[in-house]
Amino acid sequence: MNFESIVRRGTTWAVAGAALVALVAAPARADEFSQRLNDYYKAIQSDKRSDVVLLPLLAKMQPAPEAVDAEIKAMLLPASSAGWSRVQEWAMAQPQRDLVEAVKKVTSEDNPRLAWAFGQPYGSDAADPDTVIAKMYTELGDPPALATADFLYLPAIDALFCLLHVEATRLQNEGKPFEAMETMFRCLMLARQIADREFLTEKLVGMTNMYNALTRLRDIAYVDSRAETPKLTAENIRDILRRLRDDRAALTVERIRLPRGDNLAAEQIISRVYDPRGGPNAERFAPTLARIASRGRPMRMFSESAKWEALRPLSGNDLAAREALGNVFNDWAKRWDLEWNDPILKLTPDYQKLDKTRFAMIDMVVGDVGRLFPVRRSIVTEVICTRTALAMYGQFLQHRAYPRDIAAVRPVFLQKIDWDPWDQNKPPKLTLDFFVPMRDRPGGPNEPAKPHEIEVFPDLPAPTAVRWPSFSVRLRDDTFVMYSTGPDGQRNGMRKATGMVEDEKGDYLAWPPVLSLLRQNLVESGRLK
């Protein structure tokens, strides 16, 4: 019997209407879950809470111009665009200047024992009243439920990341690429703080912006390399690389943990909709889950109530639900600590094996936390690509020539050369591949050296659901090419740049940065004016 027939046979509008009237307050014992979650933030010193500094200023922030109202748009927009003057005017207005200075303050320390943290607790009762009035907090509904968490502050955080990218473009346009890179490093630090939040939604915002900031660091350096007179110096590059050391605990990707909020949210709802050591409670099951499923869309309450009432007899008991929830999160936790090429990761996750009818409630409340795995993998790749590519550019700035071997950047720029993050050998044997077009890839004995052509398949997030179209670039000996084998684990000569998209003949391009090439292509094709 399919899901639609369950709803048709098991419910009526009368039942749905009665369920809506039957909304009742959650049992008092469920309050412990919200408290347990907020207890995680009690260890943060009050004078090192970045949310206390940022949120009042974010409440005063002016809306971003349409040209930069999404991170990827703010990353791509060049200062030569027709709309730049309006964007710059917005970035230079006082509310935005106050925020830029505040970000400098809350990212000023990278010692994890002294570093700032985004420590706002969840719920209106726990948040500062002023942030509640300004809608810069996480709303848990009435009665409060972690599963209904509405992160009202996150759109402002997204806008702040847009502002930081605009600030970096402004600084580079004024001949200050080092200050632009410093801004992106602070963006990385702030994103790292959001990545330490306790819900999947928050972690995705933080981790995605960590990826964006790392990409932009290389982009700024590449734009500088194409200038008639580069402004960056070898010492500038060494300074940035010192901050990107892999032993800097405040940035270490391995310290990012799985979200605990989604797990506690499911535990809380199980305690509310199941009778102790029994089945779903007839009065609470459908109304509670309908409220969660229809949050923000009140017109769906009737249909959701009907659906959950139909699922109630099929939803087992509380012991089975708790066991299923534990299995799903324990499986994710075990996988999170494994090496990326461990064979266990190829096995089907418990979440995908979850009975989506019997445990539809768990599926709805928790969602696929496994989405964090490829995001973390992309950040690890970006860290290594950024460190190694910047080191090579620093080598060029110091000697005005590219070396023959990637190892030449050690020890002046890097103490050790990172392994290719997609090397499938155990232990790893490969570093990122490096060559100078034409110089290192000449033609035959009687043929002139030819430019190296790369077909680029941008895997950067697009402002719409449509993926960026592919395009080709031809590179000469005035730059270098650096790349990882990518997800397929094979060296394919960097003929196709496919990034994190699995392709049997594609590689992960570190330099020139895909972001820089995409911007150039959009400008040259007239799609970015």
Image (cartoon, grey):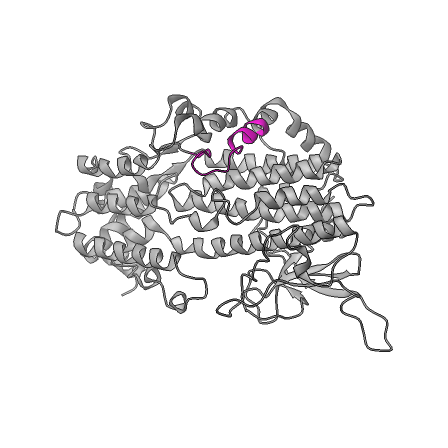
Dominant secondary structure of the magenta stretch? Answer: loop
Q: Where residue 229 appears, x then y in whole percent?
A: 82, 43
Q: Where residue 99 appears, x then y in whole percent?
A: 56, 28
Locate residue 344 relative to residue 63 in the image: left or right.
left
Considering depth in this image, is 72 or 225 the residue closer to the camera? 225
**Residue 437 visible within the image:** yes
Locate residue 425 relative to residue 321 in the image: left or right.
right
> In what quadrant of the picture does the N terminus appear?
bottom left
Residue that sits furthest to the bottom in the current view: 445
Residue that sits furthest to the left in the current view: 277
**Residue 470 visible within the image:** no
In the displayed structure, 116 sits above or below 266; it is above
Q: How many marks?
A: 0
Residue at 61% in and 46% down: 241
Q: In which quarter of the image is residue 436?
A: bottom right
Locate residue 149 relative to residue 526 in the image: left or right.
left
Residue at 32% in and 54% down: 363
Q: In which quarter of the image is residue 271?
A: top left
Q: Quadrant of residue 33?
A: top left
Considering depth in this image, is 209 or 232 the residue closer to the camera? 232
Q: Where residue 6 appears, x then y in whole percent?
A: 26, 59
Q: Is residue 104 magenta?
A: yes
Considering depth in this image, is 9 or 265 the residue closer to the camera? 265
Considering depth in this image, is 361 or 403 the residue closer to the camera? 403
Residue at 29% in and 32% down: 142
Residue at 76% in and 67% down: 440
What segment is highlighted magenta in the picture? 100-118
Q: Where residue 287 appears, x then y in whole percent?
A: 24, 42
In the displayed structure, 79 sits above or below 258; it is above
> In what quadrant of the picture does the C terminus appear?
top right
Q: Is residue 171 magenta?
A: no
